[in-house]
Image: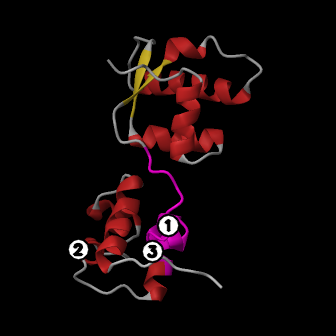
Amino acid sequence: MIIIPELSIEEIAASIKAVRKAKGLTLREVEERSGGVWKAVVIGSYERCDRALSVKKAITLANFYQVPLDELLGLRKDVKPTPREKITLDIRATTNLAPSDSESTNIRNFATLICAKRRDWNGEVLSIRNSDLTTIALLLNKDEATSYDWLLNRGLLLAKP
């Protein structure tokens, strides 16, 4: 038997909005990227609880966002939230990591690429955006919160004052 946590419509709507924002999408971008399948006004209505979301449409929306249905609907309570504060990667610390560590090498290469794309030639620290943390999570094959912890535990994040 599967026990589904009791959620309010408002919590489900907030979860739908949180998934969209976690993907870094505006309502307009959802409409554009879906080729008009998902209208901005409709998604906004779901997020404000102004419109009912059928199971069929919820599944289709979860597939569009490429997240499990339980994630879209906010049924996952065991997943740690992704840190929202400003994250700064200490690029200097990546040079102290073992060269044989492929995860560390991937992070160092990622930081180098991002610095080049942003034309940031400082090379000492890098402000990590939400989309960057998502990419790091993919490189590490972990979720975003676990990836944040991984960076923190290896001393790759700049300490806050």
Q: Check disc 3 and give the amino acid type.
A: Leu
- Location of the N terminus by quadrant is bottom right
Q: Which contiguous range is marked in magenta?
A: 59-82
Q: Is 73 rendered above or below residue 97?
A: below
Name the residue located 52 percent from the left edge and 73 percent from the top edge.
Answer: 69
Name the residue located 42 percent from the left edge and 17 percent from the top edge.
Answer: 125
Judge left or right: residue 66 versus residue 161: right
Q: Secondary structure at mark 1?
A: helix
Name the residue located 49 percent from the left edge and 51 percent from the top edge.
Answer: 80
Q: Residues within 10 Å of mark 2 (few under 14, many from 20)?
A: some
Judge left or right: residue 146 versus residue 9: right
Q: Check disc 2 and give the amino acid type.
A: Arg
**Residue ID for mark 2:** 48
Distance from the alpha carbon under mark 2 to that under mark 1: 18 Å
**Residue ID for mark 3:** 61
Which mark is first along the chain, 1 or 2?
2
- Location of the C terminus by quadrant is top left
Q: Nearer the viewer, residue 118 or 22?
A: 22
Judge left or right: residue 151 versus residue 44: right
Position of residue 152 measured from the top left corner of the image (x, y, whole percent): 52, 28
